[in-house]
Image (cartoon, coloured by chain):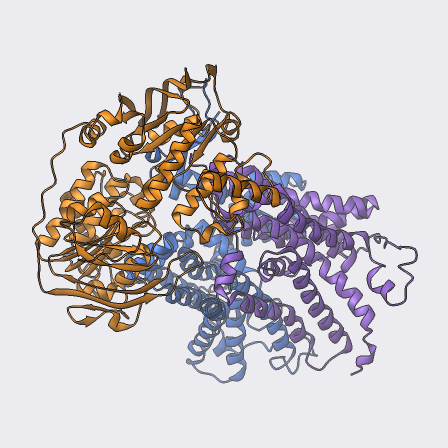
Amino acid sequence: MSLLRLTGITKRYPGVTANDAVDLEIAAGEIHALLGENGAGKSTLVKTIYGLVRPDAGRMQLDGAVYTPAGPAAARAAGIAMVFQHFSLFEALSVAENIALGMPDGRTGAALSERIRAVAEGYGLPLNPDRLVGTLSAGERQRVEIIRCLLQSPRLLIMDEPTSVLTPGEVEQLFATLRKLAAEGVAILYISHKLDEIRTLCDRATILRGGQVVAVADPRAETARSLAERMIGRVLAAPAQLEPVRGETLLEVSGLSLPPSGPFSTALRDIGFSLAAGEILGIGGVAGNGQEELLAALSGERRTAPGTLRLQGTPLGALGPNRRRALGICTAPEERLGHAAAPEMSLTENAALSAMTRAKLAPGGMIRWRATAAFAAQVVKAFDVRTAGVGHAARSLSGGNLQKFVIGREVQQRPILFVVNQPSWGVDAAAATAIRAALVDLAAQGAGVIAISQDLDELMEISHRFATLVAGRLVAPRPTPGLSIDQIGLMMGGADVAA
Amino acid sequence: MWRLEARPEPSRAMLLATPVLAVALTLLLGAALFAALGKDPVAALRIIFLDPLLDPYARSELLVKGAPLVLIALGLSLGFRAGVWNIGAEGQFIMGAVASGAVALAFYDVPGLWLLPLMALAGLLAGAAWGLIPAFLKIRFNANEILVSLMLVYVAEQFLIAMVSGPLRDPQGFNFPLSRLFHDSALLPVLIEFTRVHAGVLVTLVLVGLFWALMRWHVLGFSIRLMGEAPRAAAFAGVRPNRIVAISLGASGALAGLAGMFEVAGPAGQLAPALPVGYGFTAIIVAFLGRLNPLGVLLAGGVMALTYVGGEGAQFGLGVPAAANEVFRGMLLFSLLALNILVSFRLVRPARVAAPAPRPDPDPQEA
Amino acid sequence: MDFSALDPVALIASLLVAATPLILAATGELIVEKAGVLNLGVEGMMILGAIAGFAITVESESPALGFAAAALAGAGLALLFGVLTQMLLSNQVATGLALTLFGLGLAALIGQPYSGIKPPSTPTLDIPGLSDLPVLGRLFFSHDAVLYLALALVAASWWFLTRMRGGLILRAVGESHDAAHALGYPVVAIRLAAIAFGGACAGLGGAYLSLIRVPQWTEGMTAGAGWIALAIVVFASWKPWRVLLGAWLFGGVTILQLNLQALGLEVGSAWLSMTPYLMTILVLVLISADRSRAALNAPASLGRVFRASS
């Protein structure tokens, strides 16, 4: 007897069918994986279950009865709870207030705080109800969401990409909690594209591709590779092994510290490392540990004492972004829309945004729009950006295409140092492969590359040396080949690993 | 049931069409307003929007009223593009007028071609200085420029009164709070005989061209647009926000100050408490109606001048109260803001009526 | 110059009266901003309330009806702002300015026949015993009902925001509309309600000016009070009790400069008339200078356009 049964769920948006006759069945006490690439339709499907999206066709049954939630409140009342990937906590409110908001008629007070403490201890999720959420780490924030769900004794718990923000230790703790819940009879719908996790945790997996169910599998009977191939729909090639490269020193960073820029930003503390020409340095770590701040310090968006950064001996700290670009430093921030690119502006204008200096697009302060458009077209061509033309707004591009444009814009400027934050976040597998290849090529031509990423597999694949950012400190870089999972885990926790 | 659907990118056609649609919608609403006031709506609209275009003197008056609006809106649109909200142009206008008037009176009865440029310089500097106060307070102390620039309007109004009842008062003026009438060297030359069209109109046209080129081609114009569109992307591009805040408030203040000089050395010819008539506020509407684009501002300034010249006609001809014109201008801005949604969204009728969406649908990219 | 002509008891009593329109408008705007909406049209809603209250009171001879009409007029104009910003997604700064320009014009248009009329006076609440107390009676217990209502409104707002679930939801919407939407709260409806409440408060504040504080109708009589109310919200760091402090401060400065003008100081009345505005700037500068604190208290979604994305 299944707890939740979806039959023929279809949801169309203009130009795309997000879900195409999807069937899904989840039993009580089961940990069920929903697997698929970005854009496969996972989010739409769970939003349908959670009452945020109404399907165009198909039906849902909960305990055999027809289930048509009018909204999230109705879904919660029916015993369905969801832990979101983003956007569901209020930073300036306390843990207890956040939890009260997720409950019908929830009120803050001693009684609620007591219940929070009880549930937190019962499931091994320590949390202080009075703290402001903005001061919590990513892992702690997730606990808030989970506790918020557990207080309503759900029958089905939906977890959307829960481990993308966690350290390996926190992942273990989360899995223990989920297994305990499943043992108590709670069904768990676990959305992820991390195959190893699914193989460790889940009993069954429904695999989506292009909005359709392509397989229902037992993940334990599959290999990560076979799951990936079903998910992507083609055979994967093994990544090429990197030759170790040692060029002359390009960038030296020493004693780099930065105060936080806002109430919820991370301070950088005494960061020091060096980078050789032709080398790719991978910097891992959970988001919110100083990644954005490190990129801002390297790009020149935030200034530091001159000597903390040196490019081939030239002090950089006090220079702004364009002076640094003139010296050969190009950067690509994590947030594509709004930071790396202006959403409403055309690709041509977005090309001028960062390439004006190095590509000499504005001699004497007047922008040569024709030359700029040609530069943008060159990027589009070289990086296979799918767009109807460079006159179109940045936000009209899909995430993956815009990311290719942003990376391409910088790479086409032939930087001698390229710093990129989350190079392939939210990008489909083909685009991610292209982006990684571009980084490897750039380094092969003698540039230094710093890749900051949460995707450990990506960093293992492309980087010569590996470091982690933890609470604004950099754990000293180690050569990537030969690093064990245990060592990486220790580094993600902030420990220095002996070479 | 019609509903809104996000466009993948802003529609350029709608960007140009919505101001025209807004004027059309305002004419309809205006007709209703005049009918409600018991006036013949057709006659009222004809007097306001058609008659000034047919009569040569009224046409010249359009230039006289339009020039300050365009000049001020030109500066304001610079700041609005960057997300810097100078709404104190009225105060900067007054300070420009007072400063240039003070120069005129200091050299009272002194002939010389140098006097007008000197007055213009005084107007520019005083306006810029008045605009730079909120800029400085924003940069140094994070104070909201909207509130500070607006408060400075009231301060400037009182300052004007203090000046014309004190140091700048006409010694032979029976204690009325008015300055002397300026002598000829301190008055702008009239371009067309028997009208009030002054040299400032020409200067305004030249500045429109200059600002258009600045916004279209210059890195500064690009930086200003970038800061308004995406502040973080601007920082990434190396734009220094404080610099843009100072430039846009300083420049819009300078232009408003220059408009003040044109007004006092043109149609007014003396300093008086009644000098400010709200050009600084109406220019806000002109800036938006002109889509913050210098050429658009020129057209919008023309439309708005109609509501002044034609509005006066309706006042005398039909007894339409002056306040009705203010309401009219407010409705124009509302119409524009309401129709603006058509730039980023389109109205669609869902194909299936059977399953109406419970709420607006998500962006397909997030599906 | 004779300072002895200044009666401190009368000064403080009139300070309380002068502060009341600001308390009403600022408390309303505080609730609006806590919901994440920046309505710069307070001046326009106040002046529309001023004339609506005045006109209805003159026509009906009932100040109570007048105040009710003022609240309705303010809320009505505010809902225009609400529809534009919440449903048609217009820019809040521009729409707020439009509201002010429109409100000033509309009020002037309606108000033409009412210039120079004296409105029926609003009765003061004479509380037996308390009102007869020496000094204290005149200071605190001989005012009109609306003044006490304004004080009660501040207390109620505080209670609502900090103690009630509705207040928590309102703050959540202002903090992150995306998160509130994801939890299933009707962001637009909540904001529209807050906007209407803010408009009603501003309308009451305007009517208090034209019916009690002045009492008379003149064009543009709010003279920036709506903008000062906006500044008071910043000064109060979005905390209801501190609105009182801010309003009394401004009320005090206004009363003081008016009385000094009446004394015929040599400085000239125009210079004295500048003081409330200069004071506003000074206060804004002092309170905004501490950036981190200002950022923590300000609702994080303030002024941002919300569109349901899921």
Could you tell whether A98 is left or right of C112 in the image? left
Could you tell whether A28 is left or right of C247 in the image? left
Quarter holding the C terminus of chain C is: top left
**Residue B13, placed above or below residue A290:** above
Q: Position of residue C99 (x, y in %)?
A: 58, 49
The chain letter of the blue chain reads B
Which of the two residues, B358 or A274, is positioned nearer the viewer here? A274
Give the quadrant of residue B35.
top right
The chain letter of the purple chain reads C
Q: Position of residue A41 (x, y in %)?
A: 32, 29
**Residue B152, placed above or below residue B49:** below
Could you tell whether A320 is left or right of A430 in the image? right
**Residue A370, placed above or below residue A85:** below
Give the quadrant of residue A199.
top left
Could you tell me if residue B208 is visible in this image?
yes
Q: Position of residue C280 (x, y in %)?
A: 60, 67
Residue at image point 25% right, 35% down: A196
Which of the two residues, C264 or B48, is positioned nearer the viewer here? C264
Which of the two residues, A204 or A420, is positioned nearer the viewer here? A204
Residue at image point 35% right, 24% down: A12
Could you tell me if residue B213 is visible in this image?
no
Question: How many numbered badges does the structure rendering display?
Answer: 0
The chain letter of the orange chain reads A
Q: Position of residue B367 (x, y in %)?
A: 35, 32
Which of the two residues, B1 or A103, is positioned nearer the viewer here? A103
Could you tell whether A300 is left or right of B338 in the image? left
**Residue A393, placed above or below residue C4:** above
Residue at image point 45% right, 40% down: A145
